[in-house]
């Protein structure tokens, strides 16, 4: 089973065999959302998008029930420098490695394939 959500590894499935926490800076996520909206022909103001993402992250991290956080035993994948294809390839590699020290105990495994910069 593959599940996506902000509290899957810490609340919903804390005993999952492999937990992967996808992470990206607010700036990288804002650039991606900006590009996605532009591709859809929608208005897109990167500063407004960035501010909304920062506010959502603060709300989610500060909530008392199931705050936004990576599980202690999650593999944290920083996706700032990767496009979607590179992230998928990296995740498939991590799944293929399981069970090893990283995928069972957690740690950092950044995705580092540079993506094209298309945005402000």
Image (cartoon, rainbow, N blue to C red):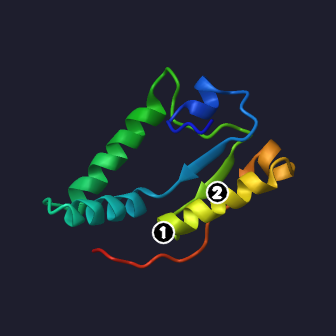
Q: At numbered mark 2, what does the secondary structure look like: helix, strand or loop?
A: helix
Q: In the rendered image, which quarter contains the N terminus? A: top right
Confirm whether residue 108 shows in the render: no
**Residue at (21, 55) in percent of width and height:** 48
Q: What numbered label is drawn on residue 83?
A: 1
In the rendered image, residue 89, in percent from the top left (x then y), is placed at 62, 64
Q: Residue at x 28, y 51 (%)?
A: 51
Q: Give whichever of 90, 47 is nearer the camera.
A: 90
Residue bearing the label numbered 2: 91
Query: Does residue 112 appear to the left or right of 41 in the view shown?
Result: right
Q: Position of residue 27 (x, y in %)?
A: 39, 62
Total marks shown come to: 2
Quadrant of image for the C terminus: bottom left
What separation in Å lies between label 2 and label 1 (alpha carbons)? 12 Å
Query: Residue 36 falls in which quadrant of the image?
Result: bottom left
| Secondary structure state at the residue bearing disc 1 | loop
Q: Kindly identify the residue that appears in the image at 23 percent across and 66 percent down.
A: 39
In which quarter of the view is residue 117 placed? bottom left
């Amino acid at each position: 089973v593959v599940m996506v959500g902000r509290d899957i590894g810490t609340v919903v499935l804390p005993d999952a065999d492999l937990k992967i926490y996808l992470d990206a800076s607010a700036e990288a996520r804002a650039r991606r959302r900006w590009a996605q909206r532009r591709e859809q022909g929608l208005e897109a103001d990167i500063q407004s998008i960035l501010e909304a993402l920062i506010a959502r992250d603060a709300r989610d991290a500060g909530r008392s029930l199931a705050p936004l956080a990576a599980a202690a035993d999650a593999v944290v994948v920083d996706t700032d420098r990767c496009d979607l294809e590179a992230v998928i390839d990296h995740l498939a590699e991590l799944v293929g490695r399981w069970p090893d020290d990283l995928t069972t105990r957690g740690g950092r495994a950044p995705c580092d394939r540079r993506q094209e910069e298309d945005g402000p």
